[in-house]
Image (spheres, rainbow, N blue to C red):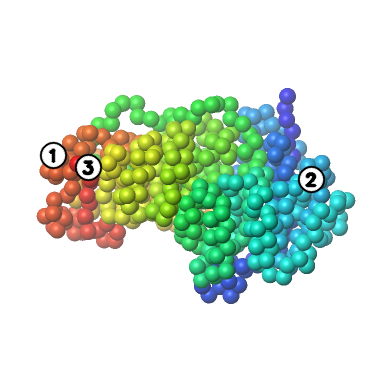
Amino acid sequence: MTDTAVWFDVHSLIDESVKVEKPSHGRDDPDKGHSRMPDNGWKDVVTMLALQGLVNRRGPRLMYDTQFWNWPPADAAWRDYYAAHKGLAFETLPDMGAVIERFGDDFRGLVIHDPAVEQSLYVACMLAGLEDLLPVSPEMAAKLEAEVKHDLRGRWTDEFAPLDYAIEELMPRCAPGMAYSVDRLWSGMSIDALDLAVARKAFIYRCSTVEAFREDAGRIWRIQGRLGPNCGIYGWGEPEDDYCRMASMNSNYIMCAEAPNLSFHAQVRADRAEFRQKSHPKEPFTLEDKVYVAFLTTEGDAMKIHTVFQGGAWHDPDRGKVPVNWGFQPRMLDIAPGMAEYYFSSMSEKDYFYCGCSGAGYTYPNWMPEPEEFFRETDEYMRRSDLQVMDCWIYFSRPVYETYARLSPHTKAFVMPAGPLQVKMTEAGTPVILRDGRLHYFASEKTPEDMAEAIRAAAADAVCRPVFLTVFAVPNARGNTSAQDGFAPSDYLKVTELLGGEQFKFVTLEEMACWNGSAACRRFCRTRFGRCGVLPLAARRTPSAHARRGKGAGSSGLHTILKQPA
């Protein structure tokens, strides 16, 4: 029997004529991290997201066309996929009122937020999740024939009092393991996955992560300290490094859930119990005297990139013609199982999934005081999602990665964006492959020709062969002007044609990991360097002619190939 879901264009609630300036996240921010975004309809969108979260607790019943900036056709593409492969039918409703009326039995009353105090809106969303209520503006409340359970108007006069109330009174009632951070971003408010937060009764807040604003920082420590360790902080906040560091220092992790319709995706079941990649090597990996190159897509930790088909790049006609390593969030198996099934079903033998930074959630492992639970949980997700390689941020610390390698034995290699140009080896035999800085977050506005030239330069600066290079770039569909540019498989195919196969070989991360972690690699390094695979001192002092020609990151040519445990 075909189930029928409602489809609604929630983007139609946004008034594009309202001018919205980009926010400031610096110390000079006159609003001290609480800059208000003009209400161009986004608060009505919050109402609809809360309704969506309540409605989808009972199944995939309400889906929105959000026209999300990263690839606007994405929601419609998922709708069509679910209709074709999951037996869902969709009925389109014309306006906000019709949707609320259709699902009037899914909420028990209203909670009115105070338009003058933005934080009251997030308190209203928490009350909505906890008590099955619809958070609304005073104007919307006047239009609805529903009982008002809470009226928050006039209750608080600043942005901190409602948050203090929520920390003390609502947090104990919220579900553990998840919180949701709202912030004002260049693209708007980070509300896109509030539906999942309401559906799962998560704690919801807005605080600036800029250290200068100590009133906010103190509250973030209270919130994350009480919810952690190993709590997923969904939503987003800026600046990113401060936001991630605060979560990490509380031994929590970030879920970049600037991703629409998650409460709907969460209810679409997978028809498979096991997930296995198609790109595992079919025969032993034979080492050649070449430059090994692995193309990596960024944003793998973020559900955002998965909900938009990798910025549309997944639909590129040249996908499958060249090895591409796609960042993958393993928690997708639980957050959106039908979506995970789609990716595993549609991948080619040249698509490889690796775990996005820095495990089953975005964090800085070096900053985590109690990482053990997160490391063990990540290992189980690596096993379940058949991932072998993990991208980790942001610097190599031997004590941290010795622990990570020991507690996550399913991880066969770590890949990192920073540090000297080399490969490290843990006591567990797990290699740590460090990236040349010129190839990290390769500038999205550049061309395949630019990328090929950067790869040539990085290869020329390497003192030793074979050379292992990872290229980290944002995925984006060709011609997609709504996003922040990036690279598609067709671009990588062009890079391979420019570089040719005589000197370069293009591989999956699993292939690269297999060789770097092999006994053959250790024997090679002993033969080449005499001890432990460490570049001799004389060679470190006197870079090769190729290295002397290099410029930029890694140009010193100090390339330690492998550090083998004694």
> Is the residue under label 1 in contact with that under label 2 (CB below 8 Å)?
no
x and y percentages locating residue 195 in the rendered image = 67, 47
Q: Please, what secondary structure does the residue beneath circle 3 have?
A: loop
Q: Earlier in the sequence, mark 3 or mark 2?
A: 2
- Dot 2: few (<14), some (14–19), or many (≥20) neighbours within 10 Å? some
Which of the two discs, 2 and 1, sits closer to the camera?
2
**Which residue bears the numbered disc 2?**
107
Please tell me the numbered disc located at residue 527.
Answer: 1
Please tell me the numbered disc located at residue 564.
Answer: 3
Q: Is residue 137 visible?
A: no
Q: Amino acid at mark 3?
A: Gln
Q: Amino acid at mark 1?
A: Thr
Residue 131 placement, left or right of 358: right
x and y percentages locating residue 23 in the rendered image = 58, 67
Q: Residue furthest top?
A: 1
Quarter of the figure with residue 444:
bottom left
Quarter of the picture holding the C terminus: top left
What residue is drawn where x is 60% and y is 46%? Answer: 176
